[in-house]
Image: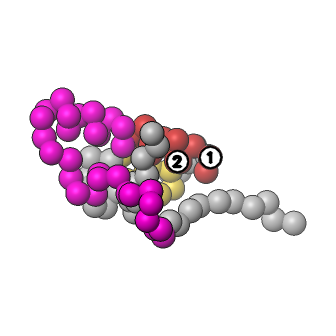
């Protein structure tokens, strides 16, 4: 079953290209992406790793890592790019 999470992300551009990605309300979430397409994949991997770490330590998940109920509407922001004409 798919689970959805809503997290604010900070994309910090890196001099060599790409971004370092963090979450201001979830300090353990840190990842990188070289392209816009990689952002959601790499963030999902980082969230999976955090959840696994909490489970291995027998720690309760922070409230922000509780999945959204799919039966309820939610607001989501996205990042996309478009080639200039």
Q: Is residue 20 magenta?
A: no
Circle count: 2
- Which residue appears farthest toward the left when viewing the image? 58
- Which residue appears farthest toward the top when viewing the image? 56
Q: Is residue 10 visible?
A: no
Q: Residue at x 29, y 40 (%)?
A: 50
Q: Is residue 36 visible?
A: yes
As drawn, is 69 to the left or to the right of 53?
right
Pinpoint residue 56: horizontal percent, then vertical percent. Answer: 18, 29
Helix or strand or loop: what does disc 1 sit on? helix
Pinpoint residue 38: horizontal percent, then vertical percent. Answer: 57, 43
Kindly check if marks 2 and 1 are in contact, taking CB atoms under 8 A apart as contact.
Answer: yes
Q: Is residue 60 magenta?
A: yes
Mark 1 Cα-neighbour bin, 10 Å: few <14, some 14–19, many ≥20? few
As drawn, is 56 to the left or to the right of 23?
left
Q: What residue is shown with label 1?
A: 37
Q: Residue at x 20, y 38 (%)?
A: 54
Q: What residue is shown with label 2?
A: 40
Helix or strand or loop: what does disc 2 sit on? helix
- Which residue appears farthest toward the right when viewing the image? 85
Pinpoint residue 7: horizontal percent, then vertical percent. Answer: 38, 59
As drawn, is 75 to the left or to the right of 60?
right
The correct choice, above or below, for 44 with respect to 75 in the image is above
- Quadrant (top left, top right, bottom left, bottom right) of the N terminus: top left
Region rendered in magenta:
47-75
Q: Residue at x 87, y 66 (%)?
A: 85
């Amino acid at each position: 079953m798919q689970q959805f999470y809503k997290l604010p992300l900070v994309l910090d551009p890196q001099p060599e290209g790409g971004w370092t990605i963090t979450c201001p309300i979830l300090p353990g979430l840190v990842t990188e992406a070289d392209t816009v397409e990689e952002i959601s994949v790499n963030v999902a991997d980082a969230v999976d790793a955090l959840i696994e770490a909490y489970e291995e330590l027998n720690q309760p998940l922070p409230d922000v890592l509780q999945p959204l109920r799919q039966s309820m509407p939610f607001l989501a922001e996205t990042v996309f790019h478009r080639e200039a004409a």
